[in-house]
Amino acid sequence: MTPTERDARPDFASASLPRHLARGVLGFGSLALAVVLLPYAWPVSLALLPVGLLALRGCPMCWAVGLVQTLSRGRLKRSCEDGRCTLTPSA
């Protein structure tokens, strides 16, 4: 796999696990607070929705995929030979 092909794949990982978890707390917290505040302060609730979605990079599933990528970064090595790709632990 060339560096150009590697850069074309979607990457949802963060630079570090604490940073990724902080994004999750901010994102899920904003979305939950938006739902709780909806009957009482709908303008604030409406303002919290984009904050939560931006912190989660669009969707909760994108954040979860990024969590797995962040945890596995540097621990797994992908190698492709003869049309078959395998993941092996890096040494």
Image (tube, helix red, strand yellow):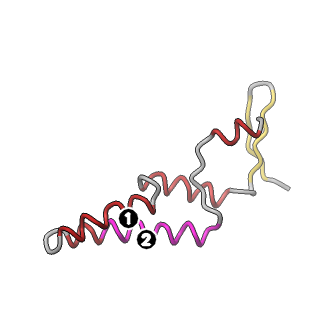
Q: Residue at x 56, y 59 (%)?
A: 67
Q: Residue at x 38, y 64 (%)?
A: 51
| Local secondary structure at mark 1 | helix
Disc with the residue nearer the chain's start (2 vs 1): 2
Mark 2 Cα shell of 10 Å, populated few (<14), some (14-19), many (≥20) = some
Q: Which mark is residue 9?
A: none
Span shown in magenta:
16-32
Q: Position of residue 44 (x, y in %)?
A: 24, 71
In magenta segment, residue 81: no
Give the total number of marks visible in the rendering: 2
Q: Position of residue 30 (x, y in %)?
A: 35, 69
Question: The C terminus is located in which quarter?
Answer: bottom right
81 horizontally vs 45: left or right: right
64 horizontally vs 91: left or right: left
The residue carrying mark 2 is 26
The amino acid type of the residue labelled 2 equals: Leu
The residue carrying mark 1 is 51
Q: Residue at x 17, y 73 (%)?
A: 41
Question: The N terminus is located in which quarter?
Answer: top right
Disc 2 to disc 1: CB gap under 8 Å: yes
In this view, the residue farthest toward the right is: 91
The amino acid type of the residue labelled 1 equals: Val
